[in-house]
Amino acid sequence: MNLNFLNNDFTLLDKKRDRYLLALIILVFTIVFINLFKPWNIGRWYSDSGIIKFLRLSSYGFVVSAVLLFTQFPLRRLFKVETFKVKTYILWLFVEVILICLLYMIMYGNPIGNFVNDLVYALRYTLLGIWIPYSFAILIIYYKNQREQIAVLQTKIAQPSEKKLIGFKDDNGKIKFSVLAKDLLYIESTDNYVSVFYILEEKVQRELLRNTMKNLEETFKESPVIRCHRSFMVNSENIEFVKKAGKKLNLKIRLMDKIIPVSEKYSPLFLDFLS
């Protein structure tokens, strides 16, 4: 396993609306699934029937959604978690599962009794019950975000660059230099710096700037400059060649010999260049 993967950004739950969507999808999915299929003979755990049974079974979904709303909003604010790395997201997910188990034990069990045995029992059924709706919700959010990013890219490509200068700020917010929008080629990340490649007097020039790709991505949100890799951003108007090899995409930028890779995360944004 590539441990560098654990240090990648996990951005699917950065937006508040996606966190609400996560809780909503899991709630609806769980209520429908558990009432229709009654896994593990859950319908026979208590001697109830009718609307009481429906409410009891549905409450399992409400518990999960309530915990997610708590962890994704007040708890994230408390710990000042604005965005996740993959490793911190996995840890956060583990905390959510434990909280769900504890709430189940309080509501349906006897937490004062054999705590460890009841926790293991609750953990087993929680993991079995949550992975399908949670995975389904994350996939829905992923594909929704992909469609939104593609729509933004298409809008950027459809609008020609204005004949204006783009100001490049350092990590202190001070403008260090400006480049004509149409002459910007690409940006490459190098540790705490970025290298900006552009055309000046018909020659390719390079400027070094102390800043991060994430900050620049926000700066270019409304421009044709788009992220294609954790280390690269390109001016989509200066892409002159796109090659697909298996699942991988590579870009050739005007006047540059360097081949720029497109990571799998950003590949859907560039597939239109192949049509």
Image (spheres, rainbow, N blue to C red):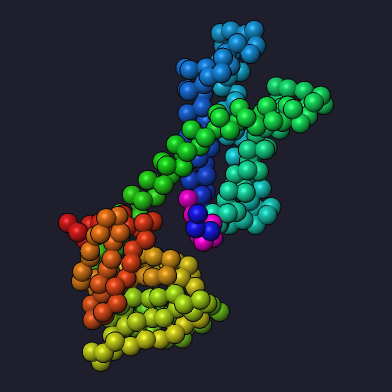
> Residue 239 placed where, x, y %?
24, 71
> Residue 251 placed where, x, y %?
27, 68
Q: Is residue 53 part of the magenta span, yes or no? A: no
Q: Which residue appears farthest toward the left when viewing the image?
A: 275
Q: Is residue 3 above or below residue 210?
A: above
Q: Residue at x 44, y 36 (%)?
A: 136
Quarter-wise, where is residue 101 in the image?
top right
Q: Is residue 10 part of the magenta span, yes or no? A: yes
Residue 6 visible at all:
yes
Counting labels gives 0
Q: Residue at x 58, y 16 (%)?
A: 42
Magenta region? 4-12
> Residue 253 placed where, x, y %?
26, 74
Q: Residue at x 25, y 59 (%)?
A: 245
Nearest to the observer: residue 121 or residue 15: 121
Nearest to the observer: residue 5 or residue 89: 5
Q: Is residue 74 above or below residue 270?
A: above
Residue 169 visible at all:
no
Q: Is residue 273 above or below residue 165?
A: above
Classify residue 9 as left or right of residue 196.
right
Q: Which residue appears farthest toward the right when viewing the image?
A: 112
Q: Is residue 165 above or below residue 30?
A: below
Classify residue 112 as left or right of residue 135.
right
Classify residue 106 as left or right of residue 208.
right
> Residue 257 placed where, x, y %?
26, 79
Of the 4 image quadrants, the one containing the C terminus is bottom left
Nearest to the observer: residue 154 or residue 48: 48
